[in-house]
Amino acid sequence: MGATAIHWIDWKNGFGDNWNFIVDKSLWGKGLGRELMQLRTRYAFTQLPLRKLKSAYSKEMRPAPKPSRGRYREVGAIARTFSLMAGGETT
């Protein structure tokens, strides 16, 4: 079905990166991504000592959840990223 994670946690400053993906395209657009974001965010702020999560979404993956749907606030954009899954290519 898919996965969600909080990784690269900076315990000292209370920051973490997070992501989720749904592999089965027949499940896209049914609110599962939004629910994953809400559950993961609640866990990060109530069960872990985190105070800030960084999240991103890919424009190629449609329908991508909008940050505001998960009560996220967009604070910037990353122009270029490095992905190990893409063979180390800069995108």
Image (cartoon, rainbow, N blue to C red):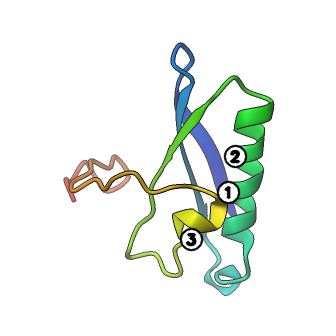
Residue 13 in the image: x percent, y percent?
Answer: 51, 19
* Residue under numbered circle 1: 37
82 versus 77 height, above or below: above
Look at 61% across and 31% down and name the residue there: 51
**Callouts 1 and 2 close, C-beta under 8 Å:** yes
Secondary structure beneath dot 2 equals helix
17 versus 59 height, above or below: above
Q: Which mark is residue 65?
A: 3
Classify residue 7 by image quadrant: top right
**Closest to the observer, 1 or 8:** 8
Answer left or right for 36 relative to 83: right
| Quadrant for the N terminus in the image | bottom right
Secondary structure beneath dot 1 equals helix
22 versus 90 height, above or below: below
Separation of disc 1 and disc 3 at Cα?
A: 9 Å
Look at 63% across and 44% down and name the residue there: 5
**Callouts 2 and 3 close, C-beta under 8 Å:** no
Is residue 1 among what the camera can see?
no
Which residue sits furthest top? 12
What's under tag 3, amino acid-wise? Pro
| Quadrant for the C terminus in the image | bottom left
Separation of disc 2 and disc 3 at Cα?
A: 14 Å
* Residue under numbered circle 2: 41
Secondary structure beneath dot 3 equals loop
Residue 44 in the image: x percent, y percent?
Answer: 70, 36
What's under tag 1, amino acid-wise? Met
Answer left or right for 77 relative to 18: left
**Closest to the observer, 13 or 56:** 13
Look at 67% across and 67% down and name the residue there: 33
**Callouts 1 and 3 close, C-beta under 8 Å:** yes
